[in-house]
Image (cartoon, grey):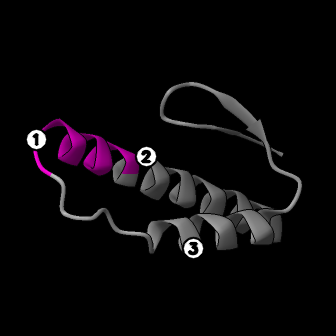
Amino acid sequence: MELIDKKGKTFTINDIKGSIAMVQEFLHYKPSGQTGSLQRLDEERQLYWEDFLKKLEQLQNDQNK
């Protein structure tokens, strides 16, 4: 299965459950309270992985139909 991220890059997903678990684990890491441009980068990173997780979950739902 393929997933296209927010930036248009295509990923081949072979293990949906494992990929979801990995992204969920990654989302638990929080930045250390940085400010300025680093804070913006952290926010963008968070939004990117939340979007990636939603797309993985949609792939999983589509597969289970």
Residue 43 on the magenta segment: yes
Q: Is 42 or 8 nearer to us in this picture?
A: 42
Task: Give how far across and how far down residue 36 sits, in percent.
Answer: 10, 41
Instruction: Name the chief secondary structure element in magenta.
Output: helix
Q: Are marks 2 and 3 in contact (CB under 8 Å)?
A: no
Nearer the camera: disc 1 or disc 2: 1
Residue 36 visible in the shown view = yes
Which residue shows up at 53% across the image and 66% down it? Answer: 26
Magenta range is 35-45
Q: Badge 1 is on which residue?
A: 36
Label 2: how many Cα within 10 Å (few below 14, some 14–19, many 20+):
some
**CA distance for labels 2 and 3:** 14 Å
Q: Is residue 9 above or below residue 3?
A: above
Q: Quadrant of residue 38?
A: top left
Amino acid type at image mark 3:
Glu
Residue 1 on the magenta segment: no
Q: Badge 2 is on which residue?
A: 48
Q: Are marks 1 and 2 in contact (CB under 8 Å)?
A: no
**CA distance for labels 1 and 2:** 19 Å
Pointer 2 or 3: first along the chain:
3
